[in-house]
Image (cartoon, rainbow, N blue to C red):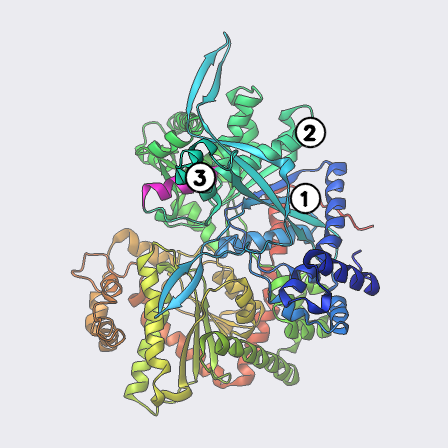
Amino acid sequence: MFEFDKDKFRSRFEDVVTTLYRIRPEDATDEQKYYALSAVVQHYITRKWLETHERFQEEDSRKLYYLSMEFLEGRALGNNLINICQDKRVREFLDEMGISLNTLEDQERDPALGNGGLGRLAACFLDSLATLSYPAYGCGIRYKYGLFRQKIVDGFQVELPDNWLKNGYPFEIRRTEYTCEVKFGGYVETNWDGERNHFVLKNYDSVQAVPYDIPIVGYGNDFVNTLRVWDAEPYESLDLDEFQKGNYNGAREKVNFVNSITDVLYPNDSNRFGKELRLRQQYFFVSASVQTAIKKYMQHHDDIRGIRDKIVFHMNDTHPVLAIPELMRILLDEYGLDWAEAWSLTTSCCAFTNHTIMSEALEKWPRDIMEEMLPRIWQIISEIDRRSKVAIKERYGEDQGKMYGMAVIWDDSVRMANLAITGSYSVNGVAAIHTEILKKEVFRDFYEMTPEKFSNKTNGVTQRRFLLSANPLLAEWITDRIGSGWITDLTQLAGLKHLADDENALKELAAIKKKNKERLAEYIYKNNGILVNTDSIFDVQVKRLHEYKRQLMNILHIMHLYNRLKDEPNLDIVPHTFIFGAKAAPAYSRAKLTIKLINAVADVVNNDAAIAEKLKIVFIEDYCVSNAELIFPAAEISEQISAASKEASGTSNMKFMMNGALTLGTMDGANVEIVEEVGRENAFIFGMSAEEVISHEKAMDYSPGDIIRQDPSIRRMLLQLVNGFYSGDKPELFRDIYQSLVPVNDQDGADRFFILKDFSDYIRAHEEADRRYRNASDWNRASLLNIAGSGRFSSDRTIEDYVRDIWHLKKLNTRQ
């Protein structure tokens, strides 16, 4: 068991400060103290990390390789101290030394290894795998600059490099012994030996894949898994011949080309170079991960055929799907297996999670790019496609609809989701309604042909970070009432339900919420310069900005509410603070314009003295895990308002719920299961059902024209987008948003995500929430029941579901 001795801890801390910085501890800056403390914590963790992996080898059990383009881990120092159960002791030790742990934690930059829900889900999964003592590796990319650091300038999003590695990262270890070669370009030479063809890649470009390992610490069990992120490095750092000729830029051209692979997350792929870079990133990290997994297996085994019992490659969405042809390449070209045997092994080792139903989000790669960049991989995918088409034809004859639905290659493009399903033994959705849509709509043909592959695994989040760490006041309150078992078994929160009618308990809960609101208000004032009313209702929507998530609906409702207040100055409403946080992809112009609209409306509303404390709008810049840990505990309304059928699951809805916020949303994603747990009376549900949305999309029978013509308040609100009300001397600024909603004719497909269709019901849901909020006891009771009902949404439960039905891992334990 981890345990810090006070004298040894202090001595080691002071030694590290002196060794790293050649100064006395009392002269060190807060940043230097942070790095020194992190080094001390890493020292203790590494001992258990080593013991854990020694146990991996002794047990020789099945291991999971979780492949993901994103791992949104958040700050590590505080989380690691909590998971090794030493946070209180270290805080006490530092207090005696006159050092604030909170101050040191604030020196840490969030690792820029992810962006949205996909990456945060992967991070939660790693936390749960370690806490449950399952052997696993997370495999991703060590982005030097992440997606971007968001600045808001004149209301617009500006993207800056997120140089999180500027001063190093104390919780990573460079593992050069696992460096491997990844090959791009060239051509494939085929040699016949009299019995079979041998395929050899020639004239290729080599990139070194160098791994950096980050410890993933289980809670209270001395178990440490690994997040392995890969950096791309050239074999030669400088073309000296070109440099000596005076061609200084050319001397570093190849270096810059290689470095670009791991520079940023999701490079703009609206042009060919961006597409090539994205594909190069995807192959780079899966090739390095699969190569290393196979080599590690073969160090302790004689027969490659045993991997089906020892290795699972799980692909988190379509980005890592090249793991399938890469594993085939290794088995065919390096181990000499025939196709049938290699395919049998591959389809026994690969599993796939789908995260979207929208066709435009299902990745496709043009043949010319794939064939030029990855010629051998292209050959293998082509053969997978040929054989799968033969199987489809044998089953369904000349049914072109089935062929179109399931073909891996169609119209000279590789369809990555189809490749994933074809090459995996398991395919899962991430919420019950999402999985049903996959089976009945998106992948209907695959489900009909191989129903045994499909299952649902509703997402979850780790309560260690988003309740125990993020909301210590609430965590302590819960532990005082039901004990600490909830930290590793969130279903125990159901034990709080008996307090639902205890007025004293509800008042205590409300007092905790108020303190968390005050904490967030301080952050908002410091970072935004806005004073918010902590007696107002904190209504929050924080997530990636995308049209289907309908942040636009939220801000349009605020515009509508503002119009009402201007028309009726004495209108009695519950004071509101509307809080947004979101990043828009750099090339997503409409999403970026929506951020500008939110800030433009905020400029008008927040500076209108006539409405005083009734309405405030806050856009939190550079939304990330660290400020999310302030936002979730303070929220009272959780906006989960995606167009029904579009959100696969959502995870912010779960984080809000376990912190006592009430969901205001559609019956979409995991909202459906949240409502099942807490009852419809403890949420605010509005809008069309998923079935209705899908029906309208199929029939193409929706146009918002009639709604606009019949509702003067909507017409007024829409006109304000283009009459300069929120854009001053640039009335056309929001024309694109206006045109996305207002049809030129009844067949032009405006309002694609049914904002105006759902708008009146959205207003009704808000009015219902306002009425409930006026009754503090009723609201606090609903808040408590949301907390008590959140046990189902722990990532611990999700991982146990995966282990039972898909991965078949064995628990290990290193505790002595």
Residue 552 shows up from this direction: no
Q: Quadrant of the N terminus?
A: bottom right
Determine if the magenta segment contains residue 278. Answer: yes
For marks 2 and 3 on the same chain, the one whose residue lies earlier in the sequence: 3
Helix, strand or loop at mark 2 = loop
Q: Which residue is mark 1?
A: 135
Disc 3 crowd, CA 10 A, few/some/many (<14, 14-19, 20+): some
Helix, strand or loop at mark 1 = loop
Q: Label 2 is placed on what type of residue?
A: Gln
Distance from disc 2 to disc 3, alpha carbons, whole Å, reads 37 Å
Q: In the picture shown, does residue 653 fall above or below 124?
A: below
Helix, strand or loop at mark 3 = loop
For marks 1 and 2 on the same chain, the one whose residue lies earlier in the sequence: 1
Name the residue: 63% across, 25% down.
304
Q: Label 3 is placed on what type of residue?
A: Arg
Q: In the picture shown, does residue 372 fall above or below 432?
A: above
Q: Which residue is mark 2?
A: 299
Q: Which residue is mark 3?
A: 252
Distance from disc 1 to disc 2, alpha carbons, whole Å, reads 18 Å
Nearest to the eye among marks 1 and 2: give it.
2
Distance from disc 3 to disc 1, alpha carbons, whole Å, reads 41 Å
